[in-house]
Image (tube, rainbow, N blue to C red):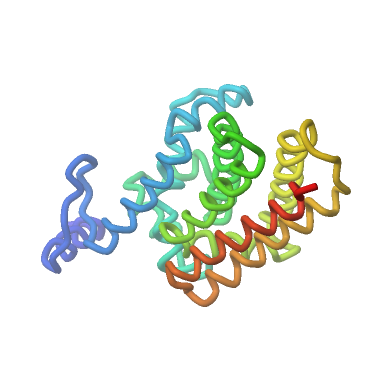
Amino acid sequence: MNIRGKRRLQSTQLGASRHPRLGWVCSMDELAGHGAIRAVFEDLGGYGAVASQQGRAGEGPLVGHLQRTNIQLAAIGVFARKGLEQATVNDLLDAAQVSRRTFYKYFANKMEVLEGIYQTSVVLLLARFREMQQVAGSPQEWLRAMVGRFFDYHLAVGPIIRLMQEEALRAQSPLAAHRQRAHQEMLRLLVERLEPELTPRDPLVYQALIWALEAASLDLLGRSASRQEIEQAKAVLGDLLIASLCPVS
């Protein structure tokens, strides 16, 4: 029996469960984590959103992008449990149930996987915020809904959000440049949505509010905040954005 087969047998003996649709064996904790990751992914638009974004970018065959996405989704749980330093490529292979050859077809190393997760998350999150504009009745409602959705994800997949945010704050990290671009895109989205109806603001005002969201996020995740604390943060940060960007005249 090969090593991977032994791991499956050991997992089964320890009370693990076979995934009903995809077939691999995983522990109950892993199943719960996998379900939360998938739920957030589907809320962000799922494979349809990935296909749409890749189609706009004209970045090659769709099947390759879906395979990359599957590897990234499987890697989220590994990074969340083990951290970037302790996670290995073998861990990612086992989680995604792909061969080494397939993995290296899409990624050079584990950092590229994390970088891909970060990029995909930002693209899908911003696309989700844009979609929310269509159903929000006013700028104030959109801001509050957007802040609420952002912090809701902390309850589902907080550990991977924390890992990526902390890594992106390191100036030497490949994620640092993506963080800067994400801030620029978020600023552009706020201007695009608000300034046709409201008084134009200094760009630094928008940037400061984005920093406030990021700082609150890091604080909540760093101390494993409770649901009640996250709900409070949603209300306070929503009030802050509305007061700063949509003041009552």
| Name of the residue lying farthest toward the front | 249
Check the image and report above or below for 86 versus 188.
Answer: below
| In the foreground, 70 or 142 | 142
| In the foreground, 244 or 40 | 244
Residue 101 visible from this viewpoint: no
| In the foreground, 1 or 23 | 23
| Name of the residue lying farthest toward the right | 202
Rendered location of residue 224, percent (x, y):
47, 74
Q: Residue at x 70, y 44 (%)?
A: 186
Left or right relative to 209: residue 95: left
Q: Residue at x 45, y 28 (%)?
A: 48
Residue 70 visible from this viewpoint: yes
Check the image and report above or below for 157 versus 39.
Answer: below
Q: Residue at x 49, y 32 (%)?
A: 65
Q: Residue at x 59, y 64 (%)?
A: 217
Rendered location of residue 156, percent (x, y):
41, 57
Check the image and report above or below for 187 versus 170.
Answer: above
* Total numbered badges shown on the rendered structure: 0
Left or right relative to 248: residue 132: left
Rendered location of residue 1, percent (x, y):
16, 57
| In the foreground, 145 or 123 | 145
Rendered location of residue 122, percent (x, y):
60, 45
